[in-house]
Image: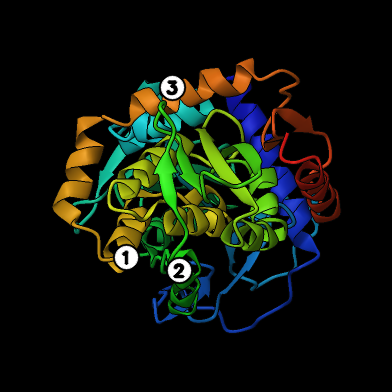
Amino acid sequence: MKRIFSIIALLTLLIAATAALTSAQDDTTDELAFSASTDIGELSICHPEDWSALRDPEGNILVVDFDIELPQEDWPEAPRIIRLFIGSLPLENEDLTASELLVEVFELDSTQIEEIEQPDESTLARFDTSQEDTSAYLYGTYLTDNVFAIGNILGPLALISEQISQLEEVFTCSEISFTDFIPEDALTEIAAYDGITQSFTEQGFPQIGSADAPVEITEISSFACPACGQFHSVVWPGLLDRIAAGEVRLTYVPMYSTGSVPNGRYAAEAALCAADQGAFWPFHDALYNAQVFQSLAFLPERISQGAEILELDMEAYQDCLDSDEKLSIIDDAEVFGREMPGFTGTPTIVINGEKLEDWSPDRLNAAIDAAIADGGD
């Protein structure tokens, strides 16, 4: 019971946070027509035509009926509010049902959750926290196999009870439309790798650059790591020029346990499978660029689309993923990274055996120049 009241308290805070965004509207109707949709990023939210969709201060998605003012003290008379947030389900948990998802996220009692079958055979899980005159429901549903939506519906009990089936449609008719993993304008960048020697270490870590290069750089990195994404955007273009010039050979050590983007292990595995067909480095670029999609960056649907755009042999690529043959390389990368002297996280940059404390472009280029001047020692 304490957990239920804590959820109500959280939802009340949401009401207060939304108050500043409300405005009055007249002539509201009891029957709602779903004739409007709002695109927020990759999510298309369907909602009644006279409702508004926006993001709250935490970045979560709201669909709000702004038909009356919303002072906090009048919470029982609040308008209908639907709050929705989406996320990528970790692949190891992909078999969770919508009900199990709610139990997992909110630590709820599974016996208090109702499964609501939908006409399109999707499942909506509902947890009722209503009290007296106030309605508050938690919901969980899937937008794709690996993308879930969790949210709530708030409002006066009578109003919500009358329209609950229509309000639930906001969850079940919202859709995800994935942005290209490799946009068309990025395809031209792939040519930057033409003519540069590509190889692998004995452990299977990808290398790029001439074996005769005077400078050896080891990048211990993770596709799930935002700081590594910053290294890629700020440092990598200039570093690639020096690799192409024959000054540097770089070894990429694909860790996955650092960073905040879900499914980093899968991303590393996919990149290594693409490496079998000579496409590791374009995949490497695309994975870092995809970090802008945050929790939805490394969905299998999006990454497989990238393999198709790169015209890989999809059967061989999928066989590689299904076989788990790259997992031993990824596990070796974890050990290698954590045993590196001075390792504190990713990215860790090592130049000719010495860890670089500051990987800003100026410091990195200065370290490369110094190594070349020393004859590569």
- Compared with residue 322, is residue 168 higher up or lower down, i.e. above or below? below
Q: Is residue 103 left or right of residue 79?
A: left
- Looking at the image, tell me whether mark 3 or mark 2 is earlier in sequence order: 2
Nearer the observer, 343 or 122: 343
Q: In which quarter of the image is the C terminus?
A: top right
Q: How far apart are marks 1 and 3 (CA)?
A: 26 Å
Separation of marks 3 and 2 at Cα, in angstroms: 28 Å
Mark 2 or mark 1, earlier in chain: 2
Q: How crowded is mark 1: few (under 14 residues within 10 Å), some or many (20 or more)?
A: some
Residue kind at label 2, given as amino acid type: Ile
95 to the left or right of 106:
left
Q: Write down the residue under mark 2.
A: 190
User: Three-letter amino acid code at disc 3?
Assistant: Asp
At x 63% / y 49%, what residue is drawn?
248
Taking the spot 19% from the left edge, 55% from the top edge, the residue there is 314
Write down the residue under mark 1: 310
C-beta proximity under 8 Å, tags 1 and 3: no
Neighbour class for label 2 at 10 Å: few (<14), some, many (≥20)?
some
Q: In this view, does 319 lie to the left or right of 8?
A: left
CB contact under 8 Å: marks 2 and 1 = yes
Callout 1 secondary element: loop
Q: Of marks 1 and 3, which one's residue comes earlier in the chain?
A: 1
Q: Where on the picture, by quarter, is residue 6?
A: top right
The residue singled out by tag 3 in the image is 331
